[in-house]
Amino acid sequence: MAAPGAATPPPSFVPPPAAGYAGDGGALTVNDLGDMAGFYTLTSGQRSAMAWTSGGGLVDLNDLVPAGSGWALRMALGINDQKQVVGFGLHGTDVRAFRADLKTGTVIDLGALPAPLDHAAYQAWAVNAHGHIVGTAGTPADAGNYHLLADRAFFFSDATGLVDLNTLATVPPGWTLVNAQDINDGDEVVGFATDGKVRRAYRARLTLP
């Protein structure tokens, strides 16, 4: 932090590509290398997930998915130092969480929990250095699917697939972890839980299989 009165550098801005973008957007997450991810709004009014790296510049993540894949990646919410980006979008008619790998140029659908949450909306919020991802399954609270009424917190890794976070932590009786907002490299997760009456912040250290 600069001393009071000292000159500080101005923020740097990353403008969207000119064609097809309305110019409204924002960066929502940054890794330790200064790589960023977020969204820009298209001229259609829909949002498009974006990422920026010092080596690759600004990338619309939808350019990584094959034509005809059914993906429309809406927002990027987390990025790790391995340049893996997570967020959510439309996959067909379902709101699904994704992981985009900027190094390999691949995008995967993280999947869904068993019924009755198999048709819930999914948002991936954070990814740590191990590639472990956390997020939330719930009901869309707006027409753009940008906000969810949280029903269940989830965890994803290549080894486990998508699983209910409540199965990986010791949760007090009567409580349910409904939101997972962030995960550190020690696999500690934070978010909020509910007992059906009130919400409480939690921190849980996961026991992974």
Image: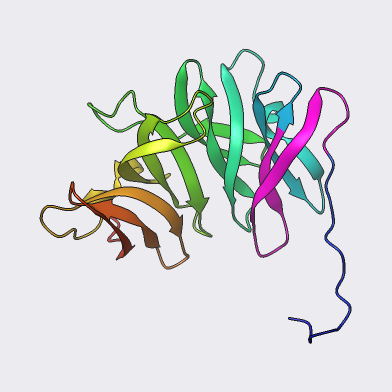
183 in magenta: no
Check the picture and name the quadrant holding the C terminus: bottom left
29 in magenta: yes
Q: Quadrant of residue 190?
A: bottom left
Determine whether 177 is above or below 18 in the image: below
Where does the image place residue 51, in percent across and percent down from the top left? Answer: 71, 43
Determine whether 1 is above or below 85 in the image: below
The magenta segment: 16-40
**Going by the image, does 152 lie left or right of 50?**
left
Which residue is at 44% across, 21% downward? 94
Determine whether 179 is above or below 7 in the image: above
Extreme residue toward the bottom, this view: 3
Which residue is at 12% across, 52% downward? 174
Check the picture and name the quadrant holding the N terminus: bottom right
Where does the image place residue 179, in percent across and percent down from the top left? Answer: 35, 48
Which residue is at 52% across, 23% downward? 90
Which residue is at 42% across, 45% downward? 135
Q: How many marks?
A: 0
Is there any visible trace of residue 78 in the rendered image?
yes
Where does the image place residue 149, in percent across and percent down from the top left? Answer: 36, 37
Is there any visible trace of residue 103 in the rendered image?
no
Extreme residue toward the left, this view: 173
Extreme residue toward the top, this view: 68
Q: Main secondary structure of the magenta part?
A: strand
